[in-house]
Image (spheres, coloured by chain):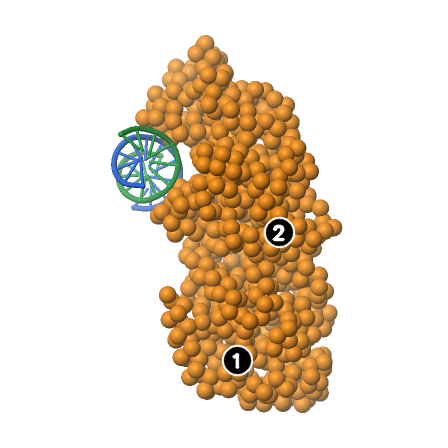
Chain colours: A orange, B blue, C green
DNA sequence: GAGTTTGAAACT
DNA sequence: CAGTTTCAAACTC
């Protein structure tokens, strides 16, 4: 609705303005981006005018001086601009003026710089004008703004191009400001810019632009080699948007142009810093998502409108890439899993994408970390059909619930995005399918039965089809609250979902992440698995000490009153876990294990004892090895706890996901947990409760918190360092793929920060290159929760 | 499929 | 921290 109006207004204003500035008209004619214009037209136009004016003034003021000044300005401006813009764009949502100014400044600087470049370095530019002349003529060109002029003159062309870029940027920024979705915009902006830059790098498409663009691209490259060039590139990238970040991510693209890579690194650094600010902002900005969505839509539309296929592709790819990151990670994870796991997960939806990624990163073998890092929701995995597992598997690892994970993931995302680029296709899939969730395969084996309702649903609905799995039906929560199973599970909503106004989609990635952060900030354990069943421990422990999820929620315990803990209303029951001392349920009849009053009474003392023990144990374990601790705790307690699950070897467990599931139905009967032990004697129960409590409380508590803490403290580290990935992966592995891990007992994690983890993991592990990895660590994208 | 129940999540 | 409201799943019909 708005777009048409905007477009109309834009067109009107554009027409009027066009009259004012021939150059504008020319640009309009040239700009393939017009579609975007529709969305941002008004703002863009205004910005454009302002730019023209400013640029002109600046140019005219001191032609000769301009050369020197410009050079300085360029550097400064770029640097400043980058910072200011970044800050403004990302950090300041409500600072349109700032951003606009920054943009303008950037544009100007870019223009001057470009012209400069063209004159000096880029003699290539058809013009090949000497510096002196170049300066003078440039302004003149600008002033004249005659399209022809520009065309003929490289400078003019550049200016036009840059102006367009600037315009785009401005438009985007303005849109952001207006929409308050800077990030989204920013991201989109980045995409656009990135596309452009990429175009340049890519040798500029076959478009009208080709001729024009060539010069700039050349400039960029040449400069890239030089520090100046880097700055320019950076400035351009920034001005354009996060291109760099994404570019960096784009192995393909970056590879093509070395200069870009250098710039990317620089850019990355900038971005890193920026990201933090952004992240903070993002967290608070809930609405951005919408705007981002719109923006993306606009972009896509624009792309569609854009005659230049190449451009469109680039944009899409980027968009895709971002999303792909997750998928990519998933893909890697999947691959790994395939390798590792007896089960052969077909990438199905992702298949096409995955190969791409592989191609992009042929040399790179996805590290297990990556997979882990991807932390999809285990639940989600469980839910999703095996075939799809691929994508999600990595996600599954996401067990890493905590904010750190998010951060990491976020950072990874950003980084991943960059890397992801190669996987652009993946994005498409996601985009198209929109179903990361769908992706999540979920080994139904594991989760399905025991775990979350989601899984059940999926099973029930899908059986194993996964794809069909039905998910949430949120109406008011927009799938951005824990009410939403998908969101809680860290999975994007997909087709099966019957949700309304869903924002839990890859398109709204930022919003989702920010929301997650908010929720985590409120409750660090919010996304921790409600119930941990860990069988994985062994493996997990090995892989992810941290990740080993303790069920934070379960720790809390249920508060059932009428369901007697015999229905899914009860999280404990749902998770196939017996109630613990932490539960406040009334008339608990949890078949998996009750916390009887008597037991509780006795146990209280026991509990105290236990707590002490637990703490000690936990402390010891932590001290010794988180991994070991996890393993011990998880293994023993869980085994006992989970009545259903027979004591398996870790490997056996992993293989047997079904065990757990099977457990469910039989629960009451089979579970030695509840019944026999309990009924037989309080003592056993007490013991069991202890175990449970230990497991849940000590083990989980400590573990989780510890993990979180660690993550939080070392969030960055995690990002950067493989350890994080490991952390994440372990649970993930266990659940999702690895045959060994598959073990029957999977975590029931309802909520796993799939998104962040995925991104992060993917980025870091799979796609991320060395340089990228570093980049990713600091990746700006990562929402620094603060 | 619509309506009710339920308890967690979110809010105050 | 406790109480209340909101929410969506689970359940029932």
Q: Residues within 10 Å of mark 2 (few under 14, many from 20)?
A: many
* x and y percentages locating residue A673 in the rendered image: 49, 18
Return the residue found at the far top. A680
- Above or below: residue A473 compared with residue A601: below
Mark 1 and mark 2: Cα distance apart in space: 35 Å
Say which mark, if any, is on residue A29. 1
Which quadrant is home to the N terminus of chain A? Answer: bottom left
Chain assignment, label 2:
A
Classify mark 1: helix, strand or loop: helix
Q: At 55% across and 79% down in the image, what residue appears? A: A30
Chain assignment, label 1:
A
Q: At 49% across and 61% down in the image, what residue appears? A: A296
Q: At 66% across and 48% down in the image, what residue appears? A: A766
* x and y percentages locating residue A625 in the rendered image: 64, 31
Classify mark 2: helix, strand or loop: helix
* x and y percentages locating residue A634 in the rendered image: 57, 26
Report which quarter residue A205 is drawn in: bottom right
* Residue identified by numbered label 2: A353
Regarding residue A185, the answer to whether it shows in the image is no
Which residue is at the front of the view, A722 or A465? A465
Q: Tell me which label, 1 or 2, sits earlier in the chain.
A: 1
- Above or below: residue A488 compared with residue A424: above
Which residue is at the front of the view, A380 or B2? B2
Which residue is at the front of the view, A146 or A514? A146
Q: At 42% across and 54% down in the image, what residue appears? A: A286
Regarding residue A337, the answer to whether it shows in the image is yes
* x and y percentages locating residue A356 in the rendered image: 66, 53
Are the residues under badges 1 and 2 in a single subunit?
Answer: yes
């Amino acid at each position: 609705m708005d777009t048409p109006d905007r477009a109309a207004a834009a067109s009107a204003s554009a027409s009027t303005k066009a009259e004012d500035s021939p150059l504008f008209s020319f640009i309009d004619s040239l700009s393939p981006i017009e579609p975007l214009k529709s969305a941002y037209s008004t703002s863009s136009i205004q910005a454009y005018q302002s730019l023209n004016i400013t640029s002109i003034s600046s140019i005219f003021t001191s032609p000769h001086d301009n050369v020197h000044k410009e050079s300085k300005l360029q550097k400064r401006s770029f640097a400043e601009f980058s910072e200011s813009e970044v800050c403004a764009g990302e950090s300041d949502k409500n600072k349109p003026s700032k951003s606009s100014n920054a943009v303008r400044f950037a544009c100007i600087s870019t223009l001057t710089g470009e012209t400069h470049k063209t004159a000096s370095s880029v003699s290539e530019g058809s013009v090949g004008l000497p510096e002196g002349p170049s300066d003078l003529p440039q302004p003149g060109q600008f002033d004249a703004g005659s399209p022809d002029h520009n065309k003929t003159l490289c400078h003019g062309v550049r200016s036009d191009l840059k102006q367009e870029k600037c315009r785009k940027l401005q438009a985007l920024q303005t849109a952001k400001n207006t929409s308050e979705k800077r990030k989204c915009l920013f991201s989109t902006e980045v995409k656009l810019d990135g596309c452009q830059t990429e175009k340049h790098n890519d040798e500029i498409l076959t478009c009208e632009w080709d001729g024009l663009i060539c010069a700039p691209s050349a400039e960029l490259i040449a400069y890239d080699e030089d520090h100046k060039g880097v700055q320019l590139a950076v400035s351009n990238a920034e001005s354009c948007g996060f291109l760099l970040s994404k570019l960096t991510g784009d192995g393909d693209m970056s590879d093509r142009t070395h200069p870009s890579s250098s710039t990317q690194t620089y850019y990355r650094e900038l971005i890193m810093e920026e990201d933090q600010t952004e992240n903070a902002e993002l967290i608070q900005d809930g609405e951005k998502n919408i705007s981002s969505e719109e923006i993306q839509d606009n972009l896509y539309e624009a792309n569609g409108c854009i005659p230049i296929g190449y451009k469109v592709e680039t944009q899409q790819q980027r968009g895709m890439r971002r999303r792909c990151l997750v998928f990519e990670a998933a893909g890697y994870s999947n691959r790994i899993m395939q390798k590792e796991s007896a089960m052969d997960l077909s990438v199905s939806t992702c298949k096409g994408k995955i190969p791409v990624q592989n191609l992009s990163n042929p040399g790179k073998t996805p590290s297990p970390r990556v997979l882990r890092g991807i932390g999809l929701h285990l639940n989600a995995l469980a839910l999703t059909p095996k075939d799809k597992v691929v994508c999600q598997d990595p996600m599954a690892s996401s067990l890493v619930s905590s904010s750190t994970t998010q951060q990491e993931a976020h950072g990874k995302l950003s980084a991943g995005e960059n890397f992801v680029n190669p996987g652009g296709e993946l994005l498409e899939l996601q985009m198209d399918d929109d179903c990361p969730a769908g992706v999540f395969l979920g080994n139904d084996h594991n989760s399905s039965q025991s775990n979350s309702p989601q899984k059940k649903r999926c099973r029930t609905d899908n059986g194993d089809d996964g794809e069909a799995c039905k998910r949430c039906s949120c109406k008011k929560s927009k799938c951005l609250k824990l009410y939403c199973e998908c969101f809680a599970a860290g999975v994007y909503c997909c087709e099966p979902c019957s949700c309304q106004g869903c924002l839990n989609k890859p398109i709204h990635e930022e919003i989702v992440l920010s929301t997650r952060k908010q929720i985590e900030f409120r409750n660090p354990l919010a996304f921790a698995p409600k119930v941990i069943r860990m069988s994985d421990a062994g493996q997990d422990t090995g892989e992810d000490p941290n990740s080993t999820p303790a069920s934070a929620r379960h720790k809390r315990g249920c508060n059932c009153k009428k369901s007697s803990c015999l229905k899914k209303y009860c999280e404990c029951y749902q998770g196939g876990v017996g109630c613990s001392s932490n539960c406040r349920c009334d008339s608990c009849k949890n078949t998996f294990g009750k916390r009887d009053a008597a037991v509780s009474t006795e146990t209280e003392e026991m509990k105290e004892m236990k707590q002490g023990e637990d703490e000690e144990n936990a402390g010891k374990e932590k001290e010794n090895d988180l991994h070991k601790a996890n393993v011990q705790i998880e293994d023993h307690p869980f085994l006992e706890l989970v009545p259903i699950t027979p004591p398996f070897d870790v490997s056996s467990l992993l293989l047997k996901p079904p065990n757990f599931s099977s457990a469910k139905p039989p629960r009451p009967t089979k579970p030695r947990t509840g019944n026999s032990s309990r009924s037989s004697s309080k003592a056993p129960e007490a013991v069991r409760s202890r175990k449970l409590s230990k497991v849940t409380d000590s083990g989980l508590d400590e573990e989780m918190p510890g993990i979180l803490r660690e993550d939080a403290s070392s969030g960055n580290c995690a990002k950067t360092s493989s350890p994080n990935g490991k952390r994440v992966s372990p649970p993930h592995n266990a659940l999702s793929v690895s045959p060994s891990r598959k073990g029957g007992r999977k975590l029931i994690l309802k909520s796993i920060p799939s998104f962040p983890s995925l991104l992060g993991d993917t980025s870091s592990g799979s796609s991320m290159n060395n340089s990228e990895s570093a980049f990713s660590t600091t990746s700006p994208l990562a929402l620094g929760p603060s």
